[in-house]
């Protein structure tokens, strides 16, 4: 079964809008856990625009499902992650001026530095995922430098959900599996576009946040999670039948 990781960043965005403590992203994570989320993803950005350090500390203490700590591959974040000890870290590119994550990590261009950071994180007992575009050289390099997981950036597919971008995801998925990497995917996924992604051969986990939190405004988080899980299951079943 494909695991659903719920990203709670944008509960924190709403909380921070007024500088208070409501809605509490940790309470949202606990509700997501109770509603069937297989894991929680939270992105501690360098600018702390949404998730903050104390949120991460509380998530680590209070969750019983795995915590996926999304972070830039910086010395500050590696030190924080090693001290916190989440189940996994997902290394993502960050630019302060970006609205959201724009592309995948340049694994090839940063291979040496990333290899050392991966080694430190794994020595702390943390599984390491790299957030990458579905490009063979990036995925192959991720395997070569010791990553456990690659998470394919589905943003381009989400913006252009046609055969070209989906074909890139299929090719990237095949490379990841052939390299022995665990295959995850995420970014910009919705009820309507998640199905084909859920059918990617070898997919183990989807991380979904912004759309789910938006839907929760209308239908509540439990119902949004339940509907997303149905969309994922339908997609996986369809693709399995098509193979
Ligand atoms: C890497 C990715 O696509 C998301 O998990 C990331 O958290 C997006 O950043 P924001 O949540 O700040 O939009
Ligand atoms: N890594 C992707 C993620 O955690 C959620 O991305 P999004 O659904 O908020 O775009």
Image (cartoon, helix red, strand yellow):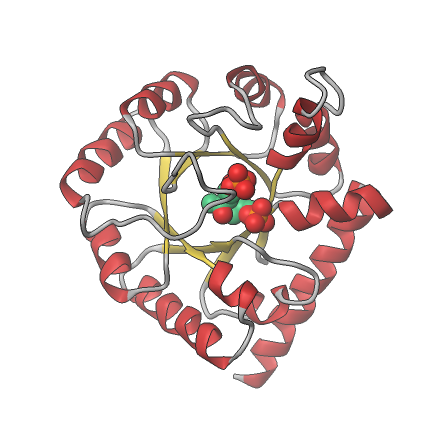
Residue at image location 63% in from the left, 69% down from the top: 195
**Residue at horizontal 34 percent and vertical 28 percent from the top:** 125
In this view, 35 is above or below 29: below
Residue 14, quarter of picture: top right
Q: Position of residue 122 (x, y in %)?
A: 29, 32
Query: Which of the pair 221/39 is nearer the observer?
Result: 221
Camera sees residue 26: no
- Farthest-out residue, front: 97
Q: Please identify the quadrant where the N terminus is shown.
A: bottom right
User: Where does residue 54 sit, x and y in percent of width and height?
Assistant: 55, 15
Q: Position of residue 85 (x, y in %)?
A: 42, 23
* Residue in the image at 74% along x and 49% along y: 225
Q: Is residue 124 left or right of residue 186?
A: left
Q: Is residue 134 visible?
A: yes
Decide if residue 206 is on the left or right side of residue 136: right
Q: Quadrant of residue 15?
A: top right
Q: Tell me the residue at 36%/34% (across/down).
A: 72
Q: Residue furthest right?
A: 219
Does residue 7 lie above or below 153 as drawn? above
The outermost residue toward the bottom is 242
């Amino acid at each position: 079964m494909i695991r659903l990781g719920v990203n709670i960043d944008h509960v924190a965005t709403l909380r921070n809008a007024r500088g208070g403590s409501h809605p509490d992203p940790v309470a949202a994570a606990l509700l997501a856990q109770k509603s069937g989320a297989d894991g929680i993803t939270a992105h501690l950005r360098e600018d702390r625009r949404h998730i903050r350090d104390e949120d991460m500390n509380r998530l680590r203490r209070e969750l019983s499902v795995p915590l996926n700590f999304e972070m830039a591959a910086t010395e500050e974040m590696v030190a924080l992650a090693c001290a916190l000890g989440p189940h996994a870290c997902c290394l993502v590119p960050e630019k302060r001026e970006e609205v959201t994550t724009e592309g995948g990590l340049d694994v090839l261009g940063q291979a040496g530095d990333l290899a050392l950071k991966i080694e430190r994180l794994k020595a702390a007992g943390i599984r390491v995922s790299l957030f990458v575009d579905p490009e063979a050289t990036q995925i192959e390099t991720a395997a070569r430098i010791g990553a456990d997981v690659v998470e394919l950036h589905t943003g381009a597919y989400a913006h252009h959900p046609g055969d070209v971008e989906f074909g890139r995801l299929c090719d990237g998925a095949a490379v990841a599996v052939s390299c022995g990497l665990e295959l995850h995917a995420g970014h910009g996924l919705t009820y309507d576009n998640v199905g084909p992604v859920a059918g990617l051969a070898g997919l183990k986990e989807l991380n979904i946040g912004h759309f789910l939190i938006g839907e929760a405004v209308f239908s509540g988080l439990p119902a949004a999670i339940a509907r997303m899980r149905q969309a994922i299951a339908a997609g996986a079943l369809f693709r399995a039948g098509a193979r």
